[in-house]
Image: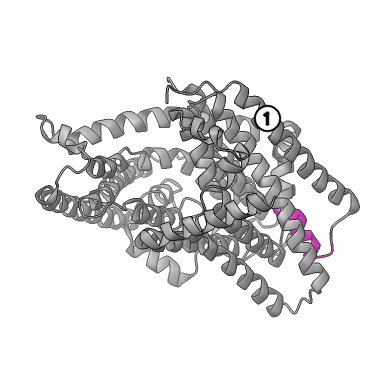
Amino acid sequence: MVYRLSFVLWRVRIVMQLLVTYFLWWAIFSQHETLFGYTQSMMLTYILLSAVVRPFVMGTRTQEVGMMINDGSLSNYLTRPINLFRLFWSRDIADKSLNIIFAIGEIAILILLLKPSIILQANITVLLFTFLALVIGVVLFFYFSMLLSLLGFWTSEIWGPRFLSFILVEFFGGMLFPLDILPESLFRVSTLLPFSYFIYFPLKVYLGQLSVISMISGLGVGLVWALGLKLLTELLWRRGLMVYSSEGK
Amino acid sequence: MKAYLKIYKMLLKINFSSLVMYRSNFINSTLSSMAWAVFNFVGIIILTSRVSTVFGWKREELIVLTASFTILTGIFHMLFSKNFERIPKLANSGDLDRILLYPIDSQFSVSFWEIHYSHLIRIPVGIGILFYLFGLLKISITWQQIIMFMFFLVVGLIIQYCIWFLATTITVRLTRLSNIPEVLYSVTGIARYPRELFRQLTDYVFIFLLPLTLIIVTPVKVLFNQLTLSEIFLFFGVAISFLYISRKFWKYSLRYYTSASS
């Protein structure tokens, strides 16, 4: 809150990006009742809720780990009796909480102003599966981001892979549009990657467009990805500590 | 003028040497830049795959808009954006003192010092898409239209430069607003969409966004012979006004720069 104006600017940026996507889809659906298997209300619900899901799943401070490794400040944490992964989990939860509060507030204001026809899910089973999908998304993204940061043990140029991954996540994560509107081949590629579990899968579950079997199998695949990334991250962490030389300190 | 051109030539050489020294950095940046350009196109192609028009713009016109945006952002990010990211850091750390002591214009120093060659890749990607699209649709473009398009693109570049410069100059006084360049990256991204999209917002917001909506839309309208005289006057009027205001604002802000015990 010390940098209040900075924070306000950041929120303005997020709202502007959301509004552009919202009006683009609103314009596209003004000529069609259904498109790509979605109605206007389904698509606008997807776009508006992605603005809430995104900070929840992808709000993270783990990108700082890479910088800590490169400037040697990781040593300060290694000498303390704390688990770095648990520390960053705590920081992430705090970061997510703040972002969620503001995101919900912004979406509520936009809904009041724009009055879109949105879908309010009332099915308890669907809501439960949505929650589970979100939790898997959170875990998956945490380890994915941590993995990118741990590259800092072997290279000082960590921002390059991170920036490239950001582009891939932006596209294959379903932030701009639901992935099933992509051509079949591209959609198949996206389902093989873990990114679809960040935004697309939880929202697809929420919209009630998946059968129970599809939801369960989706959660299963997401869980496998999360476990796989967790194991890979822990392996890289152990290997990385062996080569860590605390440069910069 | 000659002296400044000589200095700029030297800066181009120095930045190129830096590129050669950090080759993997350059390759990473180029790949990222190209990926952004390609995904912008893929996004707009997918969004318009089932509709004939969006806000009165045909699909091919929207793709031309995206291609032109790609060219302009390639030039802008190559020449200016790193410098604008630097301004808040200079003001915050007090290193702006050193810049102000140089025997050259301070606006030139802060605006042109760094050149990011990796964004050059966006220019041929954008031009390639334009040529491919016009060839595919058998749209004939005259040389005069191409020259006018390039000229209007340069004026659009000037408007974008002035917007960024005005916004980042604020950090000279309000040093805590260090995230302004990051906000600008997103905000100027709206320039690739038709102006009519922003008419949905209230007039107050639309007026605020109007300069951004002129940057790409006006040059593209040249290619489709859709530009009106009033739009031309508005375009040049905005460019000249913003050039004047940004210069004055920079000079005004420097009067309140207090350094940071450098």
Query: In the image, is residue B134 above or below residue B206?
Result: below
Asked if residue A238 lies left or right of residue A54, the reply is left
What is the x, y in percent for residue B201? Answer: 70, 37
What is the x, y in percent for residue A199? Answer: 41, 49
Nearest the camera: A223 or B140? B140
Q: Quadrant of residue B31?
A: bottom left
Query: In the image, is residue A115 above or below residue A192?
Result: above
Q: Which residue is mark 1?
A: B249
Q: Quadrant of residue B50?
A: bottom right
Query: In the image, is residue B253 above or below residue A140?
Result: above
Res. B182 in view: no
Nearest the camera: A203 or A11? A11
How crowded pointer 1 is (Cα within 10 Å; few <14, some 14-19, many 20+) is rated as: some
Nearest the camera: A48 or B3? B3
What is the x, y in percent for residue A48? Answer: 52, 41
Q: Amino acid at mark 1?
A: Phe
Res. B173 in view: yes
Q: Secondary structure at mark 1?
A: helix
Q: Which residues are magenta?
A: B216-226
Magenta span has B81?
no
Query: In the image, is residue B262 above or below residue B151?
Result: above
Nearest the camera: A77 or B94? B94
What is the x, y in percent for residue A194? Answer: 32, 57
- Residue at the image point whose x is 78% and y is 38% from the top: B241
- Residue at the image point whose x is 11% and y is 53% from the top: A239
- Residue at the image point whose x is 33% and y is 40% from the top: A131
Asked if residue B113 lies left or right of residue A60, the reply is right
Q: Main secondary structure of the magenta part?
A: helix
- Residue at the image point whose x is 65% and y is 76% from the top: B132
Q: Quadrant of the C terminus of chain B?
A: top left
